[in-house]
Image (cartoon, rainbow, N blue to C red):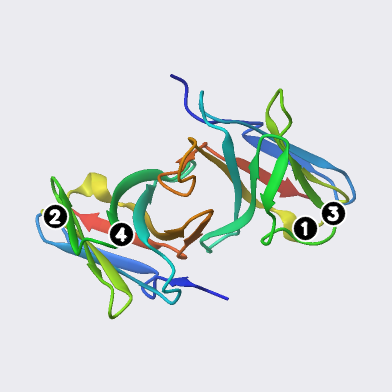
Amino acid sequence: DQQVKQNSPSLSVQEGRISILNCDYTNSMFDYFLWYKKYPAEGPTFLISISSIKDKNEDGRFTVFLNKSAKHLSLHIVPSQPGDSAVYFCAASAYNDMRFGAGTRLTVKP
Amino acid sequence: NAGVMQNPRHLVRRRGQEARLRCSPMKGHSHVYWYRQLPEEGLKFMVYLQKENIIDESGMPKERFSAEFPKEGPSILRIQQVVRGDSAAYFCASSPQGRPSYEQYFGPGTRLTVT
């Protein structure tokens, strides 16, 4: 039962361009959404989050958009940098429950 | 303030042996989560524990796997009679009191290889 889906296993963009990573969820009880970034041989690190009462949250080059009616969120990175190359996990949370997507591997080419 | 610590970082076990994975949460965190990442797959929730209590073990295989978070000491994920399919990276995360699902802090993981 995959409650959080990231349908693109990989994404490649040119340095300086926008990266858009997408995530869909099925459980309407989720009320908090997060993006984590993971480098090889390291644990995931928290990147940005958004509460269900908002539709946008921005932190520097990173912006997360939430469309509750579509049960869809996206992470925008602009401008993309080679150091952004990593696996990005989307997560959705309800009290005592957090589920992760399978991840999208982002490659930013110089 | 040290982050979440996991040890060992790498663990090699032969089929049939036991694997013990340890996780020390961040200071002040009383909620611990274990996840498994199989090759080419995402993070799969296994178990959520608070001190001396298992809150949610819906992601744990019914047999051979167990977890504990004692009053003193680290959380332990124990896998008995390991099989090759147990080879994976196991991540522990912790969170502070309150809404425990918010912003979990992950350790570096333990990579288990079963030969």
The quarter of the picture where the N terminus of chain A appears is bottom right
- Are discs 4 and 1 both within one chain? no
Depth-wise, is mark 2 or mark 3 nearer the camera?
A: 3
Identified at 14% across, 55% down, the residue is A15
Using residue B44 as the reference point, say whether residue A77 is left or right of it: left
Q: Which mark is residue B63?
A: none
Q: In terms of depth relative to the viewer, which is nearer, A53 or B77?
A: A53
Depth-wise, is mark 3 or mark 1 nearer the camera?
A: 3
Alpha carbon separation for disc pair 4 and 2: 12 Å
The local secondary structure at tag 2 comes to: loop
The answer to whether residue B103 of the structure is visible from this angle is yes
> Residue B44 placed where, x, y %?
58, 60
Which numbered disc, 3 or 1, marks the residue that appears first in the sequence?
A: 3
- Are discs 2 and 1 both within one chain? no
At label 4, the amino acid type is: Leu
Q: Which residue is mark 3?
A: B64
Q: Which residue is mark 1?
A: B84
At label 1, the amino acid type is: Arg
Disc 4 + disc 2, Cβ < 8 Å? no
Q: Residues within 10 Å of mark 1 (few under 14, many from 20)?
A: some
Alpha carbon separation for disc pair 3 and 1: 13 Å
